[in-house]
Image (tube, grey):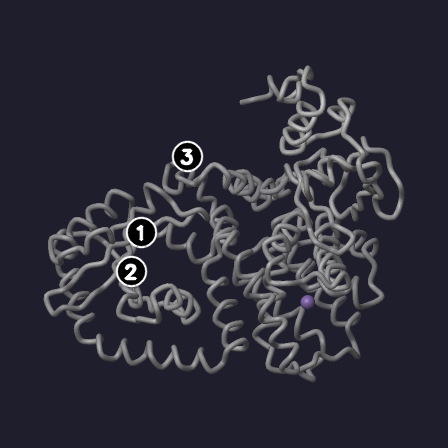
Amino acid sequence: MPKTSKIQEAVKLATKAHDGQLRKTGEPYIVHPLAVKKILEEWNMDDDTIIAGILHDTVEDTDVTLKGIEEQFGHDVAFLVDGVTKLSKARSGMKNLDSYLPETSDNLLKLLIATGQDVRVLIIKLADRLHNLRTLSALPPDKQKKIARESLDVFAPLADRLQMGRVRVEIEETSFRYLDPKRYEELKKLTEERLKRADKKLKNAQQAVEDLLKHEHIKYKCDGRVKSIYSLHKKLAKYDQNIDRVYDLIALRFIVEDVTTCYLTLGLIHSLFRPMEGRVKDYIAVPKQNGYQSIHTTVITPDKQVVEFQIRTHEMHDYAERGLAATFFYNEQKLTSAYTEGRISKLPSHLLWIKELQETAAKLASGEKVDTKKLKLNLFADKIFVYTPKGDIIDLPKDSMPLDFAYRLHSEIGATCTGAIVNGKMVSLNTKLHNGDIVEIVTTKNSKPNPGWLDKVGSKHARHKLLSQLHSLFPNFAANPDPPEKKEKKK
Ligand code: MN
């Protein structure tokens, strides 16, 4: 059966399953999954992701079962729907533990990614959140604020992690508008005033650059960019609320064909206007942490206007705006690895998983069978996340055991540990911990660590703490500070 009719089938199933349910807006519930479908289509996601997006709320809220979905739509769709369902469960689990505080948001983000497993699950989750934000006005104010807070703290960084700049900005702007409507309006007005005042001078600067580029036969696209209200708000906090110190309030963006032309364009701009010292940033040679690439320079034009220019290639632009979703798109277009051609080669090593994903995405798009495990996010693959009984999340290296957890809390808790309770059950100290375990450490005053514990720690941190305690307890104690098997594994 062709995939498009599978999508129709999914719409039919979801419509039937959600029949009679209403959203807080008063509309029939199906409006929401259909909106998620539309967002995922705009992001050029693959059919399995779109189908899973349509069905994302069925298993949790209706009679539809995972098994039924697997029979009708295959394993991959079922896997994705299951991932989204598990994510909402993990989150509501955290809510029950009452542990959601802004301080834990980084952990929540990590948990989302660790639990998300497949990057497409996170992309569906983002589409889901985006639509819920767009329709937030239907909820009571306290709920609006809560969802906005969580979106700002967790989902915006998640979008950033996936390099989906446009989505991040929409999440930030909408959330901020609900969290602090007064400030939002104030800054919006301020920006508009500034923009109006600078309009003529900006047009002059843009015209001068465009003339020169044309003269040099350089193909380009130019658009203006106004800083988002939320990032202005953040920047003003750093600069004593002095808007004159925000140099990138208005930026002119030039998009050109290739990297060489980026540098050429930079040179041309500097031949026209005086660059401000220390304001040239080469994110092409040294990309930002999330892989963002572009050259930024701030100049002063002859009519004393400060303007930031941003120069980048089309690929970099698409990447900055749409991130991973753009990756799927490019692969669909059979634009073979932009990596090997060096156009987006300079990703920091911790982001190399994107390359893997990209290759897998290419296979998916060409209809090749793909091992779903390959889509697993490697970002935190070497970590596990466990809870304290109070619900705080502690991240530990994979293969950690209760003593690793104990030493992570405090070296004294480690030293006096006499037992561990995992998920309500007493376990031995050499039990491996897993994602989501709730771990409680039993301590006994004046109890001492012993050398046998060296086999019961998996993390470097705990091992070092333990060793230094053993050294002071047993002056003649000698042991290799590194775990034996880890020595030769170094790459
Ligand atoms: Mn939903």
Q: Give the Cα separation between the discs numbered 2 and 1.
A: 8 Å
Residue ID at (23%, 54%): 219
Q: Earlier in the sequence, mark 3 or mark 2?
A: 2
**Which amino acid type is marked by label 1?**
Arg
Horizontal side of 271 relative to 45 (left or right) equals left
* 235 left or right of 298 in image: right
Q: Secondary structure at mark 2?
A: strand
Q: Earlier in the sequence, mark 3 or mark 1?
A: 1
Give the vertical position of 127 relative to 407 (above or below): below
Residue linked to disc 2 = 253
Residue labelled with disc 1: 312
Residue at x 63%, y 33% (from the top left corner): 461
Discs 3/1, front:
1
Q: Which mark is residue 265?
A: none
Indicate the position of residue 480 as horizontal and vertical percent values: 64, 17
The location of residue 150, given as percent across then percent down, is 60, 66
Instruction: Say which residue label 3 marks.
Output: 340
What is the x, y in percent for residue 140?
A: 66, 83
**Could you tell me which residue is drawn at 69 percent across and 84 percent down?**
26
Looking at the rendered structure, the secondary structure element under dot 1 is strand
Q: Is 90 left, or right, of 158 in this rendering?
A: right
Residue 446, compared with residue 486, is above or below; it is: below
Residue type for callout 3? Thr
